[in-house]
Image (cartoon, rainbow, N blue to C red):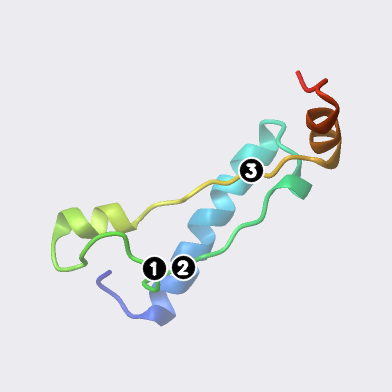
Amino acid sequence: STGNDRINDPLSLNRAKSVCDFLKGHGVSPERMKYEGRGSHEPVATNATSEGKRKNRRVEVYILPSQQMIDEAKAGTLK
């Protein structure tokens, strides 16, 4: 990242929230999602290069199963 954490942490949080809002708008239940901003705290690449900085501006998405999905999977009836 180029800026400091005071700048980058809110940017990271807003990026993650935007993705959750998009998914919610496309039918994913908000109860199955949460979002967190990582800022510069968990880079996947070096921030010494433009390419590395680009890779670190990312959103990782994990959508959790609902309780109904879990129950159907256990019963072998999940579609």
Q: Secondary structure at mark 1?
A: loop
Which residue: 17% across, 53% down?
Answer: 51
Position above or below: 61 against 17: above
Task: Pinpoint residue 41: horizontal percent, then vertical percent.
Answer: 40, 73
Task: Pinpoint residue 63: horizontal percent, then vertical percent.
Answer: 64, 43
Which of the pair 14/67 is nearer the observer? 67
Which residue: 73% across, 46% down?
Answer: 32
Which residue: 68% across, 36% down?
Answer: 25
Position above or below: 70 against 8: above
Question: Are the residues at dot 2 and dot 1 in contact (C-beta closer than 8 Å)?
Answer: yes
The part of the image, by quadrant, that contains residue 49 is bottom left
Q: Nearer the viewer, mark 2 or mark 3?
A: 3
Q: Of the two numbered discs 2 and 3 on the same chain, state the one appearing first in sequence.
A: 2
Q: Amino acid at mark 2?
A: Arg
The part of the image, by quadrant, that contains residue 2 is bottom left
Q: Which residue is mark 3?
A: 63
Task: Pinpoint residue 48: horizontal percent, then vertical percent.
Answer: 14, 68
Q: CA distance from mark 2 to mark 3?
A: 18 Å
Residue farthest along the front direction in this orientation:
75
What mark, if any, has residue 42 been given in the picture? 1
Q: Secondary structure at mark 3?
A: loop
Q: Which residue is mark 2?
A: 38
Q: Amino acid at mark 1?
A: Glu
Position above or below: 27 against 59: above
Q: CA distance from mark 2 to mark 1?
A: 6 Å
Q: Amino acid at mark 3?
A: Ile
Q: CA distance from mark 1 to mark 3?
A: 20 Å
